[in-house]
Image (cartoon, grey):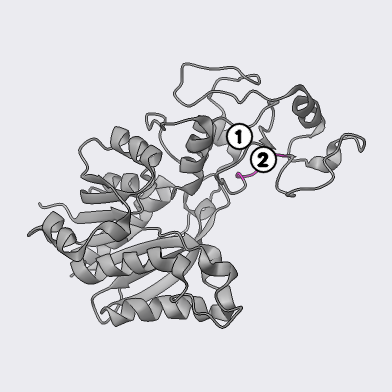
Amino acid sequence: MNKYKYIDLFAGAGGMSLGFDEAKFENVLAVEYDECFAETYRFNFPKHNLKIADIKSISNEEIKKIVGNKKIDVIIGGPPCQGFSIAGKIGRNFIDDERNRLFKEFVRFVEVIKPKIFVMENVAALKTHNKGKTIEEIVKEFERVGYTVKYDVLNAVNYGVPQQRRRIFIIGTLNKENKFNFPKKITKQITIAEALKDLPELKSGESSDIPNHNAMNHSKQMLEKMSYVKDGGDRNDIPEDIRPKSGDIRKYIRYNSNEPSICITGDMRKVFHFNQNRALTGRELARIQTFPDNFIFKGNAGKVQQQIGNAVPPKLAFQIANSVKEVLDNE
């Protein structure tokens, strides 16, 4: 039986690709702009057709040439949308904001290739932004190129991911009736302690034989501050004379061992391990995002965190892929 074929745009380190691979889809093309992200992708998906390029530089003719006579079943990806701060505030539409050109590039690929279905992932705020007008604009763009669209905000914690992570998934099909069903929620939530329990303990600055499981080297002052923060606690546990007075309230907190993790972002250096005096390692963050331990991230510690924080959790991507497969099977 032929595998369904997919293209991954804005592929990053490959969270979505991994989920679709595990659901037995076949990669035809992956596009990633950042060299370091692409290095991680290439290492973990050596058989994939990875193109390291600015997506805007790939012409319609080149797209057709790459695809050839292959029938693409699905296009997946999460184009960065940066125009939130302006769109709607000065009468400017989301679609017209130059910083959302990358969203338009996703639409262009969909229009040129005409896959049977597409999956676009993005920040949850897209749903309510500009009083719902932004998502309306996005839906209209896809309808313009022939797709019937549905969308929903999913929290990864409801799909076997040990993390509170809300993201919007926008699904379009060429059929007049969009028969895609979002995956069913899993009732049991996984705590961060369950996800990390078998990884060896590390002190600040220590390394291990496990790839990406190396502790950040914290300053003496930082170690003192974090020593006061209890399991699930925050900066208010730190004595007032050394407590940070300003800055992000999501910093200087300790993960709660009895709950799923807070949302993993590209910078988790000031969020502390629930019972060790340090920030989480790349491997621990990858575990929370449901990357397997044999998935190796390339680059320095900052780049590794960025790659992990930007990714779609593979376990959630896998369940989305299975829902996509149901639509394709029933055509």
Q: Main secondary structure of the magenta part?
A: loop
Depth order, front residue of 165/115: 115
Residue 43 image point, x, y percent: 30, 32
Amino acid at circle 1: Ala
**Image-quadrant location for residue 102:** bottom left
User: How many residues crowd mark 1 within 10 Å: few (<14), some (14–19), many (20+)?
Assistant: many
Residue 24 image point, x, y percent: 23, 47
Going by the image, does 103 lie left or right of 322? right
For the residue labelled by badge 1, is the local secondary structure a helix, a strand or a loop? helix
Residue 180 visible in the displayed image: no
Looking at the rendered image, the quarter that the C terminus falls into is bottom left
| Residue 11 is covered by the magenta coloring | no
Depth order, front residue of 146/158: 146
**Sequence-first tag of 1 and 2:** 1
Amino acid at circle 2: Asn
Q: Which residue is mark 2?
A: 258
User: How many residues crowd mark 2 within 10 Å: few (<14), some (14–19), many (20+)?
Assistant: some
> At 40% from the left edge and 58% from the top edge, which residue is drawn?
78
Looking at the rendering, the stretch of residues picked out in magenta corresponds to: 253-261
Farthest right residue? 241
Q: Which residue is mark 1?
A: 193
